[in-house]
Image: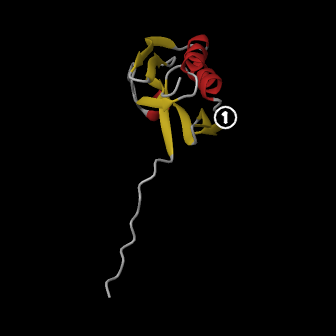
Amino acid sequence: MQATQSVTQTVLKGLTLAVVRMSAMVDFYQSVFQAEFQPVEAYGAMLFRGKIAGLDLLLYPQEVAGIHVDQNRFLLKFEVPDINHIINLALTNGGSLINAPADSEGTKAAAVRDPDGNSIEFEQIRY
């Protein structure tokens, strides 16, 4: 009889984002993704912990993290039910437009930058 091996699946549980403009980033992610951040004092700084799309998100001041970049520390991509609504939320909460919503083979896609310049893509499959 052969022993079965346990297969461990890798699961992404969270994302820590080093930020420059903390207040603007908290407002943006709360407004666009309903992140509901909770302030957490640690390492002599104020951090903010929340969730987006079921993923833990921690906003961490870049000076405390020792990371100094201007933009695109990551790229997120989300499927959304109403792309025009989410783009409007992003733009009215400090985001900037990279690509306006465009149709391609049954999918509508667009991209924005958050207040720190990170790219976020949105895709609406059925419209």
Rate crowding at label 1 as few (under 14), some (14 to 19) or many (20 or more) other CA atoms within 10 Å: some
Measured as percent of width and height from the top left, residue 83 is found at 54, 20
3 sits left or right of 101 in the view: left
For the point 43% across and 24% down, which residue is it? 106
Query: Residue at coordinates 62% horizontally, 37% vertically from top-left?
Result: 50
Between 70 and 79, the residue placed more toward the observer is 79
Residue drawn at (51%, 43%), measured in percent from left and top? 14
Residue 21 at x, y = what percent? 54, 19
Which of the 4 quarters of the picture holds residue 28?
top right
Q: How is the image coloured?
A: secondary structure
Q: Amino acid at mark 1?
A: Pro
**Residue at left 44%, top 18%?**
111
Quick check: can you spot residue 107?
A: yes
SS class, disc 1: strand
In the rendered image, residue 74, in percent from the top left (x then y), is placed at 40, 30
Between residue 108 and residue 15, name the one nearer to us. Answer: 108
Where does residue 114 sit, x and y in percent of width and height?
Answer: 50, 19
Residue marked by disc 1 = 39
> Is residue 117 visible in this depiction of the protein?
no
Extreme-bottom residue of the structure: 1
